[in-house]
Image: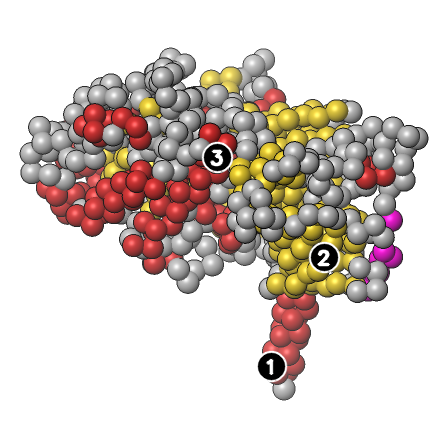
Amino acid sequence: MLKTFSAIAVLLTATLMAQAQSSLVSFDPAAKVFRLDGGGASYVFGVNPRGELQQMYWGARLGAKDAFQQAAPMPEWASFDSSYTNTPQEFAGWGAGLFMEPALKVTFADGNRDLVLHYVNHAQTANGFDVALKDIKRKITVTLHYSVDPESGILARSATIQNGEVQPVTIEQAAAAAWSLPQGHYTLSYLTGRWAGEWTLNQETVHAGARVIESRRGSTGHQANPWFALQAGESSEDHGDVWFGALAWSGSWRMTVEQDQLDAVRVTGGFNPFDFGYVLHPGQTLETPVFYGGYANNGLGGASRLLHRFEIAHVLPRTAATATLAAPKPRPVIYNSWEATEMNVSEAGQAALAEKAAALGIDRFVMDDGWFGQRKTDHAGLGDWYVNQDKFPHGLKPLIDKVHALGMDFGLWVEPEMVNPDSDLYRKHPDWVLNFPDRPRSEQRTQLVLNLARPEVHDYVLGFLDKLLDENDIAFLKWDYNRNWSEPGWDQLPPAEQKRVYVDFTRNLYAILAELRKRHPNVEIESCSGGGGRVDLGILRYTDEVWPSDNTDPFDRLAMQDGFSYAYTPQVMMAWVTDSPHWLNHRSTSLQYRLLSSMQGSLGIGANIAKWSDEETAAAKRLIAAYHQVQPTIVQGELYRLISPRDGSEFSATQTVKADKSQSVVFAFIHSTQKGRLFPTLKLKGLDPAAQYALSSIEGKARPDTPAVASGAWWMNHGLEMDQEFRGDFQAAAFRLDKK
Ligand code: GLA
């Protein structure tokens, strides 16, 4: 009897929890109000009496029965700011005196450039709505797609623009969405960088005017990343209201964060309008990228944890082997040959590295650049994707067989969208690259960009990759992209239409990735662009991991990994251990420090392991084995940035907690001890206060100042005290806590 009761109680609790987590999507026809609830957030918008779609609320979840009146437009502000520009529209057409960033700006064939979008109708979808808007006179329709994730409350928004006119229309500017924030004062966070210096977190007060974050480069870019967070008032890492968003697009993009003359804050983002122009012929449609947006009430830390969970559950692709799983598998620990051999690869050399890699306990052996065409330096070979006979006289099979016999799977580097002028492909098809006729073709790294928007280039790239995967037992492709665009002409099209390259290139990239995954459902892919030049939620739908930076200096990486983690889950963050002194900063660090720095993400080894001593090999082997044991907690657990390395602090620390709170992993780093300062006591987070957790050191050093077993409450309130000997330059420690 008792048993039955407790079973019912469990069932009831489960149902209640499911309700609390579930999404509700509703439309109130009388007030013309749409409402989307998910996780801890609600999003409300409605049709105002003029017919415009207007945002009404975005923030912490409201009561299920809370009702809204019909949306009231903002009034005119004297005669200088129309009600149209002041009203927080969901997707404002440029017309009728709009001075805020438009969501859509078009030029009609007759020169008219006025566009005013009014609500027409809507349809309810699985977790959201499709809402149709139309210009007040002309047959331009925009269908806004909304869906909410029941668990996180993260919204996915995008738009489909259709030309129902009898003449073509040029789209000058098209956003995926505009996000309006509650009236308030905000701090904006965004990520910028450069080659070998990605993932700098910038934080600044939002002032009147616009802050534009963008790429004009044809791809995502190292220089800025399409993610933002806006914190209200006193919000911090752990507390307060945060609104955040991420644009799923790997071509030129733009996000404009504006504070208008009435202090209202809006973020509008989508295709970059710079050099944009997409001709829609009668009946044609243009699909915008998806702009994700979310709300958290527990600071930037809460925001990134929501985003991480969402990416793992809803963005990242699955292989055939993981198709039915709630999360993709943690990444295999890889070895990559790049820093060891650069392009000087050979069957014997790679086989020797593979033997050493296997001895370390590596799961996947990846051969980097240099295996194809006449590739000796970066001056030749890109485009010629046949195996270099001098380096691999019997093809790739002997090496791949060897790697398999050693118990690893095999991965290969490719850079499909590029060509060296010194290549058979370029000699045969000089017209296949982005170019303006009779203008110079600017080379970078002696390479040019193939115009992937062209059908024949699409077919060539898909064809050679498909053949490569058909003929060789390859588990993984590192897909590189080592320059940005110049002279982005497409002279096979009429002049007015050439700018569609900004859309079609990226769409074809996605199409090739999708088709390859369909034909080879177990192959995994890494997105690399000279490091982190192509990391966004668009490419992450088709790629399993990313290479965050060519900078593998373990100290630099701490801050870069910290920056990365605001927007992206450690599951996709590859981090290699390379040689010391480091080639970039000439900094010397211990092997242990390098390993622990890389173990904060998805671990790889990229050093010249052929030169490692027996001692180094044994130490790395032990830490790789220790990593394997806790990897799921590190890469898919809840991440807490305990002390950020960002602020030039002497110290930094992170903690991850497994979803069921049964395990936690802590990393602590010292940059350079000054004045004998001791490492601060780390108050841990996210544990079960009542449970007992046993602490052990991952790198195998005793920590006498801490109890071996204590409650979650102890670790969170008293905290974890470091050994007083934990001092010096570039020191690292790691711990695991296991629930007893
Ligand atoms: C890029 C990548 C590196 C390596 C080289 C090969 O720079 O980011 O990891 O693959 O190309 O040329």
Q: Which residues are magenta?
A: 65-72
The amino acid at mark 1 is Lys
Res. 360 in view:
no
Label 2 or label 1, whichever comes before in sequence order? 1
The tag on residue 497 is 3
Q: Is residue 267 above or below residue 45?
A: above
How many labels sit on residues? 3
47 lies left or right of 326? right
Q: CA distance from mark 2 to mark 3?
A: 30 Å
The tag on residue 53 is none
178 lies left or right of 226? right
**Residue 278, position in %: x, y?**
53, 37
The tag on residue 3 is 1
Q: Is residue 149 above or below residue 485?
A: below
Nearer-the-camera pick, 155 or 349? 155
The tag on residue 120 is 2
Q: CA distance from mark 1 to mark 3?
A: 71 Å
